[in-house]
Amino acid sequence: MQALVKVRPEPGIWLKEVPVPEIGANDVLIRVHKTSICGTDIHIFNWDKWARKTIPIPMQIGHEFVGTVEDFGSNVHDFKRGDLVSGEGHVVCGHCRNCMAGRRHLCPHTSGVGVNRPGAFAEYIAIPQTNVWYCDPSIPKDVLACFDPLGNATHTALSFDVLGEDVLITGAGPIGCMAAAIVKHAGARYVVVTDVNPYRLELARKLGATMTLDVRNERISKAQEKLGMKEGFDVGLEMSGNPWALEEMLSNMCHGGKVALLGIMPSGTPIDWNLVVFNGLTMKGIYGREMYETWYKMTAMIQTGLDISPVITHRFDYTDYEEAFEIMRSGQSGKIILNWSD
Ligand code: NAD
Ligand code: ZN
């Protein structure tokens, strides 16, 4: 089969002929229909510091996908050939205290599909049955291919009550944009989204942001003034990974405000702890998606009218992956879909 593989320790990604994965007794073999490109894939493409220390070579990359069940091991009884499925990209141990307590997203022994084990940018992928999510076939496949990042957005956006609240989202990448749509769907009042990229701010507006700010030339305090807000934002969702965005967020929260942090900051990023202490802020780090409460919630939200489809801006056949990766690297895109089969 064909797959996109990191074959050399240098920038780039290569289409290669590799064997169809073998399945163990508990595994499901999935024929991949569509995948979407994640920021992680771009880190691996670029071969940055994180990728150099994390990714063994060769590595078949990709973890956002939808497909159909092709085959399964002898212990698998809940899936049948042809079922439409997606998959959770974090494979957990199942035995640690958190796994046993049902907090699988907090397993300290997590391995990542397309990061530590063969990924989804391929004609077939094999994952444990406990990682397979049965999809509602009435949901478009392009949207199902984005369930992994939609899960990051959902896990973060629903960490705190947003009904009637004013929400600040720093970073209008695909995840920040989807988070704007989610908090709107969940009943937030004002949803202010910041970025430094006009293309992405436009995308955030399409997904339902009340107001967007290009923080290269506008301060968040200005948005508060314009909206007639007096006490700051109730909920903050940090989705840029930029230290200055976090600093700005903390100084624009109301007393008692709640902040969920998804963006990956450089190690050692300083913050003004006095803002946290004297303003009584709550801060929560977010990793991955809750298994499988997040998957359940995102399915239910889409079934009840959440529309994240405007975040999908480009579609390519997988053989045109080079162009797809170039556009994703330029920042002039939302989610980009690669089509592998129908
Ligand atoms: P992305 O890189 O596409 O989006 C980040 C956005 O932040 C970009 O549009 C960028 O222009 C913007 N930005 C840069 N500086 C800014 C500033 N000062 N203020 C506001 N915005 C600024 O990333 P994404 O795929 O949307 O993911 C969002 C973040 O979440 C990334 O940091 C990513 O690494 C992280 N992430 C974390 C997890 C997790 O499990 N914790 C999972 C997925 C992604
Ligand atoms: Zn575990």
Image (cartoon, rainbow, N blue to C red):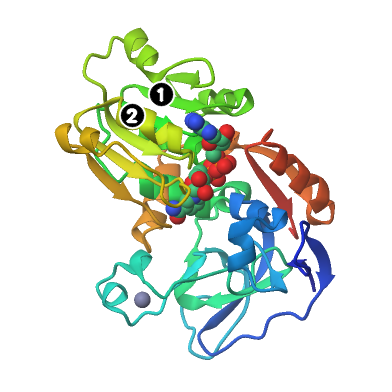
Mark 1 packing: few (<14 Cα in 10 Å), some, or many (20+)?
Answer: many
Disc 1 designates what residue?
Answer: 192
Regarding mark 1 in the picture, which secondary structure is present there? strand
Q: Is residue 264 left or right of residue 116?
A: left
Specify whether tag 2 is near ligand 1 (CB below 8 Å). Answer: no
Residue at the (37%, 42%) spot, across then down: 270
Mark 2 packing: few (<14 Cα in 10 Å), some, or many (20+)?
Answer: many
Image x and y of residue 163, in percent: 25, 32
Task: Examine the image and state in which quarter residue 13 appears.
Answer: bottom right
Q: Is residue 293 left or right of residue 207?
A: left
- Which kind of residue does numbered mark 1 sit on? Val
Residue at the (51%, 78%) spot, across then down: 128
Q: Is residue 29 left or right of residue 138?
A: right
- Which kind of residue does numbered mark 2 sit on? Val
Residue at the (30%, 67%) spot, across then down: 103
Q: Is residue 237 above or below residue 5?
A: above
Most foreground residue, 93 or 102: 93
Disc 2 designates what residue?
Answer: 167
Q: CA distance from mark 2 to mark 1?
A: 6 Å
Image x and y of residue 237, in percent: 37, 38
Image x and y of residue 80, in percent: 55, 76
Task: Examine the image and state in which quarter residue 48 appears.
Answer: bottom right
Regarding mark 2 in the picture, which secondary structure is present there? strand
Q: Earlier in the sequence, mark 2 or mark 1?
A: 2
Marks 2 and 1 in Cβ contact (< 8 Å): yes
Residue at the (83%, 70%) spot, across then down: 16
Q: Is residue 244 visible?
A: yes
Q: Is residue 186 visible?
A: no
